[in-house]
Structures are given as C-alpha cells and as structure tokens.
Image (cartoon, rainbow, N blue to C red):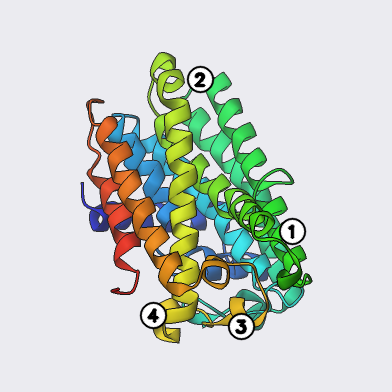
Amino acid sequence: MHLEQELKHFEAFIEEKTHAYFPLPSLLNEAIHYSLLSEGKRIRPLLCLGFAHAFKGNQAQAMSSGMAIEMIHTYSLIHDDLPAMDNDDLRRGRPTNHIVFGEAQAILAGDSLLTMAPEFLMRELTALPVKPEKIVELVVLLLQASGHNGMALGQSLDMEFEKKDLSQLDRKSLESSLANIHKLKTGAIISWSCMAGLYSHPDQNIIQKYKCQVQSIGQRIGLLFQMVDDVLDVTASLSGLGKTPGKDERSGKLTYTNLYGLKDATAMARALAKELHLDLRELNSVEGDWSMITEIINSLEKRLPIS
C-alpha cells in the first residue's frame, strides 16, 4: 500500500467530514477549514492507517482515528503559531491562521478542533460499530496524549527552556530535558497514532500482545520526526520547510542541533531510523502489510541533508 494512494483516500475523507462537522458559512468554521484542510504531510493519520494495515485492522476505524489526531495536531499548530508562543507568520507555505483571521478567531478555531476531536472519534466509531469499552479507552488515551501530561506539557517545558541560559546547565541535564520535551511534545500524539492503528484490530488479545512494542516504536518515530525537524530548521529553505527557517536557533530553543551540532544530530537521526527498521523486522511475523510504516520512516530519513 503506497503512501500517496492512502494520502489521497485520507484527503477525500477529511474533506467530506470537515464539511459535515464544520459547515459553512461561519467565520469560525472558515478558520477551521483554512488550517485543517491545508496541505500537509499527514504523518499522524498515515501512521494510524499504516499500523492498521500492518495488523490487518479495520481501515474505517483507522481513518476516523486519523482524522481525530489530525484535528488535535492542527489545533496545536494554530496555537503554536500565535504571538504568545512561537510567533510565526507562515505555516505549510501559507500565512498562519491568526494572520488571516486574527488572534481571537485562531484561538477559538484551535479550541474547537481540540474539543471536537474526541466527540468526532466517539460518534464515528460508535457508528461503525466499535465496542464501547474500546472507544472509551482510545478517547482517554487521546486526551492523555494531548493534555497536561502529554503534548501541552511538552510545549510548556519547551517554552520554559527559551528563558534559560543553556550554557549554565550541565550536559546530562540538557540531554535528559531534551528527550523528555520531545517525548511529550511530539512523541505522545505520534505514539497514539500508531496505537490507534493497532486498536483497529478486532481481537483484544492481539492488542494487548503488541501494545508495548507499538507504543515504543511510536515514541521513537516521534523522536525521529523531531530530530529531522530540528535539522531542517537549520538547513532547509523557506519553500522546502513551509515555515520560517532558523527560528528555533534564534529564539534559544533547546534542540538537537544546538545541543549536539548539525553533523551529530543528523547522524543520530539516521541511526534511529536504522534502529526502527530493525524493530519492524522483528514484527514482520505479524501477518500484515508493513510497507506503509517502512515508507514513512524512509520518507523522514530522506529529508535529512546528504552527509
């Protein structure tokens, strides 16, 4: 199953459901459409679908899970770009939401996406139908990954470090803090995306058997994504990145490139990609199609500069 084909299926699905759940005309819903339907890599929903293929799960369930996590991700981007946070005026090659619609509408659009995601997931999975206890577990895990013990905490810690003099902190503390920030900020919802694909399998025994492995792989895919993002912030052009390059370094963020240097950060990302491929080989005994997950890891690695 090729990524491009699955991406087309997902884009058609998200277009249909966005119009159904956020009908126009409405200024608020227009702001939601602007960000939710903008062209992106859709890594998180593709991971949902990829792990559903890998474990021969229910593709309709994985598709709905993918849209729920894309809502969460889009909300986080809208809020991240606000002047009070990362203060960026470009996202995915277009003006950010608050530049087009104003800060108030952008905040409300993000809030709406955050609160609609669990409602959407419950409504869509109930209609399939999926067992109520599985729906509850998925929604609880989604909220945990998104909130004060997950992505929101990671963003908070990330912003805290902008105010610190990194030269005054010891190396081990910085390494530990960096790993923790991105385990929460990036890894939590990427890990949920992988888990949601596994949870599309009808057999609870299969879910329990592979849950820890998939969670670990998801966390490390999230880490790889962040390493690549940090490297590209230093090396990519505006057109290639789709957002303002070099902002992390200028704002004093704790990143893999400013802690380890560009060369070592790139090497670490390549080593992690290799490690992930080895982990996937161990799971190849599971009778499913792992090609999408392999393609996603390859696509992340290919974005790195040639050493």
Under mark 1, the amino acid is Ser
Whether pointer 1 and pointer 2 mark residues with C-beta atoms closer than 8 Å, the reply is no
Q: Is residue 71 above or below residue 51?
A: below
Res. 197 in view: yes
Q: Is residue 162 left or right of residue 240?
A: right
Q: Residue furthest bottom?
A: 238
| Residue at 70% from the left image edge and 61% from the top image edge | 170
Q: CA distance from mark 4 to mark 3?
A: 16 Å
Q: Which mark is residue 131?
A: 2
Give x and y (percent) for residue 165: 76, 73
Give x and y (percent) for residue 129: 46, 25
Q: Is residue 253 left or right of residue 90?
A: right
Q: Which mark is residue 240?
A: 4
Q: CA distance from mark 2 to mark 4?
A: 43 Å
User: Residue tagged by mark 1?
Assistant: 156
User: Residue tagged by mark 3?
Assistant: 89
Q: Quadrant of residue 268?
A: bottom left
Under mark 3, the amino acid is Asp
| Residue at 73% from the left image edge and 58% from the top image edge | 157
Q: Mark 2: few, some, or many residues within 10 Å (few <14, many ≥20)?
A: few
